[in-house]
Image (cartoon, helix red, strand yellow):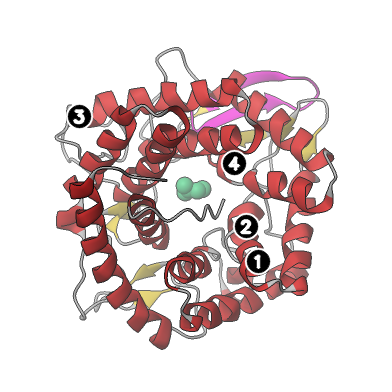
Amino acid sequence: MQNNNRNVSKWADGIFRKIECKYRRNAQNIKGIFPYTADKDGRFTEQPFLKGRAGVQWWTNGFYAGIMWLLYSKTGDGLYKCAAKEQEKMLDDAFVIYDELNHDVGFMWGLSSKPSYIFDKDETSRARALIAANILAGRLNVKGKYLRAWNHGDYTIIDCMMNIPLLYWASKETNDERFKFIAELHADSTFKHHLRENGSVAHIIVHDPLRDAAIGTLAGQGCAEGSAWSRGQAWGIYGFILSYIHTGKKRYLDAAIRIADYFIEHTKARAWRVPVDFCQPDHPNYIDNSAAVCAACGMIEITGATGDPHYLEAAVRILKALECDCDFSDDTEPILNNCAASYAENRQLPLIYGDFFLIEAILKLCGNEFLIW
Ligand code: GLY
């Protein structure tokens, strides 16, 4: 996006130089793991949830490759391309294990194989991204008109709005409209069932699998049923504006704006710091910077789509407020601290998607035009 504020550009350029310094070192040093969080010495570690060989299927395993492609898009440095392609090859095992693959294939291959094909014209990468798109499209419940989350129960989750950009890409790439139809069915279902009157979104909706009907909501990673988990709000803002960018359908822009307005109102009241859940008790004041940076990306795109500077200004305030949680030193590998996997556990730690969306947001403010989604 073109950012016409010279002070903001100068600030973002300065942050980008520090990011590049740190991640240039990371790209040289990190081999053979999918970074997720960090140990007490600040070294990247893998996710602890899926054990052994199954771990390759974890939903965040495309983010480090995605960071490498973002940095490549700005610098053109082959170091980042090599590191991204190494991660992409490591992901192949997930296709053959398969049993834990779910709606998150969009994150996994949309951030690794799709940019690999875009930048490198690698046909194997194209095939991987299309296989992932087919797996995602195959999750459609034809009667319920939604993409099923996980591999048990009949749920939709707001997070999935970030997976469907892979379907928009697959339609363009293959000239096959079906992928886009499925993405829109899912976006419309999310609009209908997740978006609340006050502009917040529910994390999880329980569906009747035999018709287009919601039969309940769950707290998910938020603090309580009916609450407003901040990363869920961020997935909604960025996910809906991406659906608008890919389809031109105004209802998705309107949804992104409604959720962004809710997010801004509740963040402004907290000196622009983002809690894990906007409905959490005042103490302890758990912060989730991963939600903050993802929401900022969405808000910058809303200004790009509408020309309304309010959303860009809010994004900059949010990003400046979390600068105190950024570690640009040589001593550690991740940058952004104080992220949270959920309200209940794994809080106040670095998470790879925190770094990813921080880098993406800063690159947008630097005027980088490449949209990885
Ligand atoms: N399931 C994605 C997230 O934790 O936000």
- In the image, 221 versus 310, the foreground residue is 310
Q: Position of residue 159 (x, y in %)?
A: 53, 41
- In the image, 241 versus 229, the foreground residue is 241
Residue 333 at least partly seen: no
State how many labels appear: 4
Q: Against 147, is 73 above or below?
A: below
According to the picture, the residue beneath numbered tag 3 turns out to be 268
Q: Residue placed at 48% from the left, 34% from the top?
A: 236
Tell me if label 2 and label 3 are in contact, CB under 8 Å.
no
Does any atom of ligand 1 lie closer than 8 Å to the CB of label 4? no
Tell me if label 2 and label 1 are in contact, CB under 8 Å.
yes
According to the picture, the residue beneath numbered tag 1 turns out to be 113
Image quarter for residue 337? Answer: bottom left
Q: Residue placed at 32% from the left, 72% from the top?
A: 20
Separation (CA) of disc 2 from disc 3: 32 Å
Q: Amino acid at mark 2?
A: Gly
Compare marks 3 and 4 and give the one earlier in the sequence: 4
Q: Residue placed at 52% from the left, 26% from the top?
A: 253
Q: Position of residue 316 (x, y in %)?
A: 25, 42
Separation (CA) of disc 4 from disc 2: 13 Å
Judge left or right: residue 2 versus residue 305.
left
Image quarter for residue 327? Answer: bottom left
